[in-house]
Image (tube, rainbow, N blue to C red):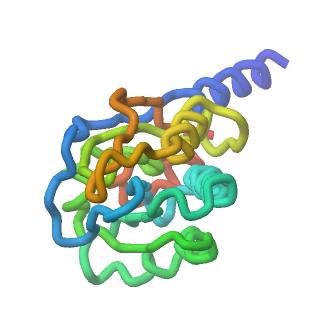
């Protein structure tokens, strides 16, 4: 019983331990892969195609799409460590991501774009306003691999559902404050996250 208790404690600690995040720029960083949407906030989720924890992040993203249809531009950027890792582009997680309506899928060779946005953990999500200002950074799950109410999801939902105030034909006022939340997932640049998770569990 003691061993079981210690095992459960270790598992709960692992599931509740937030991942690392780098410094996310306050203004949209230029890159050659993804572009800022012209009329709505842009949401980017950085994902590892073999991270089992990220299935929950995709589930929460799908819920965001359902609860705020047409209110944001959704992008999932999968890390791909080199152009020869073709199996990564056809993983079960990638196939699942392709079923989320209105969300665009891209691959980030060698994590070049992720590093520009400060993403270091799979599931890390950023939201930028149409004029390129950071509105949110962090995760949209409450713990590793678990769906359910959490502060990150609610923060993003509030941001994208805010009623825009049209100051002029070319400008939309968005919330001035930035929100953050812890992110839970595998290391984004880990080449074998599945085995890492198995050993920890």
Residue drawn at (52%, 41%) of the image = 162
Give the residue drawn at x 44%, y 50%.
122
Would you place residue 92 above or below residue 117 in this image? below
Above or below residue 187? Residue 30 is: below
Whole-percent x, y for residue 198 in the image: 59, 49
Residue for point 61% across, 61% down: 69
Query: Quadrant of the image for the N terminus?
Result: top right
Is residue 46 in view from this perspective? no
Relative to 161, say whether 7 is above or below.
above
Occupied quadrant, residue 152: top right
**Residue 78 drawn at (x, y percent):** 40, 66
> Which residue of the protein is positioned furthest toward the front in this rendering?
168
Specify the quadrant of the image occupied by residue 180. top left
Instruction: State the quadrant of the C terminus.
Output: top right
Q: Residue at x 52, y 28 (%)?
A: 17
Q: How many marks?
A: 0
Question: Is residue 104 shown left or right of residue 93?
Answer: left
* Residue placed furthest toward the left: 30
Residue sitting nearer the eye, 32 or 115: 32
Foreground pick, 164 / 85: 164
Left or right of 105 in this view: 15: right
Q: Nearer the viewer, residue 13 or 1?
A: 13
């Amino acid at each position: 019983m003691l061993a079981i208790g210690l095992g459960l404690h270790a598992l709960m600690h692992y599931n509740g331990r937030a991942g690392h995040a780098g410094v996310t720029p306050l203004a949209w960083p230029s890159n050659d892969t993804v572009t800022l949407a012209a009329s709505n906030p842009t949401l980017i989720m950085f994902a590892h195609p073999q991270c089992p924890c990220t299935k929950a992040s995709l589930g929460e993203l799908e819920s965001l799409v359902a609860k705020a249809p047409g209110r944001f531009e959704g992008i999932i950027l999968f890390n791909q460590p080199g152009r020869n890792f073709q199996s990564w582009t056809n993983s079960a997680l990638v196939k699942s991501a392709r079923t989320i309506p209105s969300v665009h899928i891209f691959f980030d060779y060698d994590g070049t774009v992720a590093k520009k946005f400060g993403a270091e953990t799979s599931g890390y999500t950023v939201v930028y306003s149409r004029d390129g200002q950071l509105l949110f950074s962090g995760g949209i799950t409450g713990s590793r691999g678990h769906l359910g109410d959490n502060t990150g999801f609610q923060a993003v939902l509030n941001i994208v559902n805010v009623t825009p105030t049209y100051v002029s034909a070319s400008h939309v006022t968005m919330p001035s404050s930035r929100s953050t939340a812890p992110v839970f997932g595998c290391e984004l640049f880990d080449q074998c996250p599945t085995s890492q998770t198995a050993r920890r569990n």
